[in-house]
Image (tube, coloured by chain):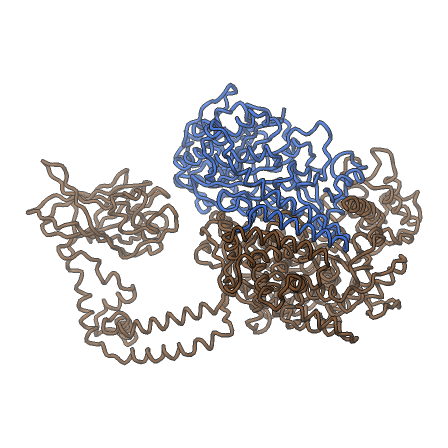
Chain colours: A blue, B brown
Amino acid sequence: MNFLPSELCRRTFLRQNSYGVGAAALSNLLSRSANASEGSSAADWKGVYSVKPGTQKIKRVIHLCMAGGPSHLETLDYKPKLAEMDGKPMPKSYTEGKQIAQLQGQENSLKCLGPQHAFQRFGESGQLISSLLPEIGSVADEICIVRSMQTDQINHDPAHTLMNTGGSVPGRPSMGSWLLYGLGAQCDNLPGYVVLTSVGGGQSQPIAARQWHSGFLPSRFQGVEFRSQGDPVLYVNSPPGVAIADQRDLIDTVQSLNRMGNQTFQDPEIATRIAQYELAFKMQTSTPELMDLSSEPSHIFELYGTKGGDGSFASNCLLARRLAERGVRFIQLYHRGWDHHGGIKDGAKVTAGLVDRGTAALIKDLKQRGMLEDTLVIWGGEFGRTPMAQGNGRDHHIMGFSCWLAGGGVKPGYHWGATDELGYEAVENKVHVHDLHATMLHLFGIDHTLLTHRFQGRDFRLTDVGGRVVHEILT
Amino acid sequence: MHRLAAIHTLLAVSIIFVFSFDSQGLSAETIDFNRDIRPILSDNCYACHGPDGAQRQGGGEHGLRLDVEEQAFADLGGHFAIVPGDVEASELIQRIHSTDDDFVMPPRDHRKSLTATQKKLLSQWVEQGAEWSRHWAYVAPRKQARPSVRRAGGNWIDAYITQQLEAQAVEPLPQADKRVLLRRVYFDLVGLPPSVEDIETFVSDSSTHAWETVVDRLLASPHFGERLAVYWLDLVRYADTVGYHGDQDVSVSPFRDYVINAFNANKPFDQFTKEQLAGDLLPSPTQEQLIASGYNKLGMMSAEGGAQPKEYLAKYASDRVRTASTVWLGATLGCAECHNHKFDPFTQKDFYRFAAFFADIEERGLYSGANSDSNWGPTIRVPDEELAGLLQPIDKQIEALTQAYEQVDVSSAQSAWETQMLNSDETWKYLSPDEAIAKHETMLKSLEDSSLLATGPNADTNTYTFKTTVDLNGVTGFRLEVLPHESLPAQGPGRSSNGNFVLSEFKASVLSDTEDARPLSFSKAQATFEQKDTDKRNPLKGFRAEAAIDGDEKGNSLGWAVLPEVGQTHQLVVQLNEKVGMEGRVQLQIELVQNYKRSVGHTIGRFRLSATRETPQINPLELLPKGIRELLLIDSSKRNTDQKNQLSGYFRSVAPELSELRSQLEAAKQKRETVEAAHTRLTLITRRVEPREMRVLNRGNWMDTSGEVVEPGVPHFLHQIVERSDTKLLSTHTRATRLDLANWLTSPENPLTARVFVNRLWKMLFGVGLSKVLDDLGSQGEFPTHPALLDALALEFVESGWNIKQLVKLMVMSQTYRQSSIATPKLIELDPFNRLFARQSRFRIDAELIRDNALAVSGLLVRELGGRSVKPYQPDGLLRHLNFPVRTYQHDHGSNQYRRGVYTHWQRQFLHPALQSFDAPAREECTAERSRSNTPLAALVLLNDPSYVEAARVFAERILESDAKTDEERFLRIFLQALSREPVDEEQEVLSKLLVDQRMRYLADPDAAKLVVSVGDWPTSARLNEVELASWLAVTRAVFNMHEFITRN
């Protein structure tokens, strides 16, 4: 059923570079203006990127996006010096001339806010993790903490856009879309890029659909949101009074009519349309199966701490595993609850409580199924929070924050990079968002400088003009 | 069949290979620099040998430039990159062929490398004399003789097309079937399908003018403007929400209507340009021109707390450059924000000079508070046509009531009221403290007027304890006055930096030496003012007086506060649950608890306590508006006339004697407001302010203020603005304006604007542009397939006075437009992407048109023009990720449910899924070309979106209620209306089978039939049998899901 010449592309055009994308010809072929249709869905698209055998460590990513900006100082980055400085003025040498968000206007009266929760050592690796995250602590030996993250955007909307697309100007493809474009998906009855969301524990900052959009890449590569209420995928249910057999009947009729039309028109677009209707029908039948958790044994519910179906983060973690099993390439879970401008002591505790167990359960579950080795799990937000107090909370912060990675190709029980003694600025082994993207692509066997798409005369890539693979955290 | 498709694909692939590497591959004997050579140099060499000086490598002092003629041929110190006619001496040629890793170009580690064909072309070019020309798009089109080739029934467009076809020995296809042709031109010009009658008329009209008659009628249709607006609104990124962060609604729909009306009125494109970029700068701008100036306010805006205004001003500025340069110049000037352009001669300074044109637009970087007050910038009110007529009777009524109201004499009642007001405070007695202490190191200092002033450090939270000895017998309540003081921030009365405080709890108790303190409880609290609160965690939605006596049951952070009414006195009055029946003097303790936690230091700065034995109430004087209170305190004999009038005016507004008339008047005014609001829209406009300073931002970094300050200007290498339009208006008399920019864009010397516009229009009508990259006519764009035709059209457009309808007519009157789109395999093999235009293109119609088509075919479409944006059905919860404020989507009822897609509420962050699935852009950024995808999600929309199910049902009802009685007659009717043609036998058979199956199915389950025919708001026809209707609904749904239904052939 593959009407798009992806295989042909690669055979025909990849003469110059042995691996990577076949240069200009391919961009030309795929450009938006080519009169030929965009063709089929992500499902039967094999990708433009030819991976060098033996370099691909992972098959999928599960991005646990802690939206709102979790405080690294209450989660992954222990700063005893900051505790000592609690209530004292923040030294100006740190903050002068630096960006500041809601603390604008208070530059002269910034005070330190000590860590609001204790840290403890977990696992054989002895990783220092907040006492708010004991479950994540229980998988400390599986994860690699990066404590030297940096980003460029200090407000939620553009910071998410940068984290997802490598740029803050809307219109660029998100990382999941790049992956589908580069490698295709591994499933033909579900979208290759799925987004799930949950809320709780703090102010729910908005999240735009832009965050999973395909930008200037063809729209078949965009992320599809799965919902816990209403149709799990928009319009995936037949109209009321139309049974699935009726819908099949109807689609069969449409397919026959389109085939007849194609005898006149000889139009590959019609063949593609026929394929899309088959896929649509498959989605109609496989999505309920995916969302139906009744086949999960009770010890799994116990592990995740959920009965499922409630839209909670834990329930989404369980769905993430099911999606991963079914070949979804990029799975993104947003938990919108980390924006603790005030009341961070209580707020971080509640939010951490909502995500801790599900996260750890996902790692354990993937591991027991042998899937952790070819999955990359990323846990982190769009930025961190200030060591300075904003009342009894913390403001947005971009100079230094933390995240962790786990799974295929990443050193387990490891940590990398460090902020200064107050947790203000990453000073050792800085990792920019672009570097995180480069590293993720590298684990797929993709050279981030070669996965490009021409738009408005320029070859764009996920890592813009930056990106360095952080080899040091890889096995 | 699949195998066949695969073979086609294979052919397509090999052909495009030839196309892209053999530079059109079709007539490559004589090398054309712009067509054959510049694209190779640009793509492979300009990154290091192009306009960006910072990255430039090699040769000479400033590096080797291959984008500028003089430098490409310059002496690089005894050697030359290019020596015309001498391949051996041309280092460029030597290097590209070299096998030496240190010498070869592009370098081994460069991402680009040349193909053998490209190398050969470069060598041939040098051999042939290395003729150089400026980039084609930067040289204004010149008038040239048109080809003499003719094509029967066509016009001069066909001459250019036919000339090239003849050179290739390709036969163009014959004219399309008349039904197909009519359907094509309907979709293209008005975006709607022809009716059955339209088809019959056209098919039976054999006159030579038949086609022209149709074209003229469609160009005159009001739906022409709606059709073209779809394309223009993408470019100028029109939307109904702001895009950033909370994606709040913004009222700008009159701009959309302006665009529709402008296309309908055939407004010349130069005028259209001026009104949008600079409507506000035109002499005495009309309302229409001001609405058009809203163009400058269509970009994304942010109200995200903590956004830095300067950063966002920089974002808005660069968005405007990207948009205007794409819309009018087809240029990627936006790429020069951080450095000089890599491929085209745009410098970084060009970028910021262009941005400076827009530095005079009134705007804020951070639209703080706009999430609740919707203030996104200057607006005007746009009434609709009905309003004036509707207001007339109401205004008459208001006038009559006002007269009656003014005639009643209330002077004696007023004197009584004044006396009562002035004596009302005597019921309160000040309490003076035996002791007043605060926590932490805060001190409470007694002032002469019995008030207490807090001094010393302001702790995060505090509690003031006030003890006094007093006779409480008969006391009914207490009063807390908070008072301003010059020592307090913002004059107080609070100690927070904004002058505010939060009183979490007012406690009172009677102390005793022998017993436990006896707490007093309160039944009621009122205050002169209560602060609002939008925080969801606050169940009271405000900082209310009642929160100060709630025993902190609702949280100890809640309490009474007064922002923004700071800097003045406020009163809180609390009423005791019962009178204190206690004889003699006792020790009373009052505690003012101030435990606010969401922010720190919200404590009271100065206060005074009182008690009363009367009904405890706020001094009515304090509740009067400030100005009135002051007037009342002036001795009545000393008030001047103005003051007297003011006071009596106020009294009349509260006098019980006038209450009847007042409420009538109030009701009439209310009605007026309601009517006016329903018939008036606000719309953002541009208002000019003193221009903000515009600097070149080094690496695009808005925090770096060391860059050069620039004035407005156009790209340095194009013709410059020579005459300024309105220097008189300017504070600095040398600065070019947006109007100058608009005039420059539409001046005859401008090489880009007309080409860009005609190329996009060509794409709309022929499926692919003459230069296929619609948003980049620069070095990385595509050399046109028919450069002479593109130039001739551009010249014609300018010479016609930028006449859009004339240009459209010219294009659709050509035989090239009218050709069949059913290509022979041979033609597909030769020209898979239809770059020769030997046939018409076939493509899926735009998202909005898919909706319009279904509604039109069903008969549901409401063909009204303009108005507020409308909300079709949408799945619940789609907007649940939005916040500030939280949104729930309410779909429209009645006629607004059945409007055209162009009127759909454009929610940037969550575009309506039916539009999005068919590639309508979010309009966060300027979009010159939509992709045309074909996905399962789109299939799900057509299959299951209630809009399409409802339209299919109403269509089925129409068919069943028509005079078509047999199944065959009904199939025929369905096909004619939905596809403009008759069904073939096989199609009828397939549909009959579906119909029979569905009848069986719904006969067995009539409840299911009832359900499916009830989808949508539109009432189900009571005359029809539900089982029969449900079965036919399956048939119409099947037709709505046919590829042909959404395809323009």
Tell me where residue B333 appears, x and y as whole percent: 68, 54
Q: Nearer the viewer, residue B610 or B970?
A: B970
Q: Is residue A55 left or right of residue B118?
A: left
- Residue B893 lies, with reference to residue B562, above or below; the image says below
In which quadrant of the rendered view does residue B261 lie?
Answer: bottom right
- Which of A63 and B658 lies nearest the eye of the viewer? A63
Q: Is residue B863 above or below residue A276?
A: below
For image coordinates 49% across by 30% down, the residue present is A76
Which part of the image, by quadrant, shows the C terminus of chain B? bottom right
Query: Against B148, is B698 above or below?
Result: above
- In percent of width and height, residue B539 lies at 34, 48
Q: Position of residue B971 (x, y in %)?
A: 66, 61
Residue at the outermost top position: A124
Q: How many marks?
A: 0
In this rendering, position of residue B744 left or right of residue B100: left
Q: Judge from the rendering whether residue A308 lies leftward or rightward of residue A280; answer left or right.
A: left
> What percent of the width, then of the height, locates residue A89?
42, 36
Q: Taking B308 as reference, is B332 left or right?
A: right
Work out whether residue A223 can be spotted: yes
Judge by depth and name the residue closer to the eye, A87 or A209: A209
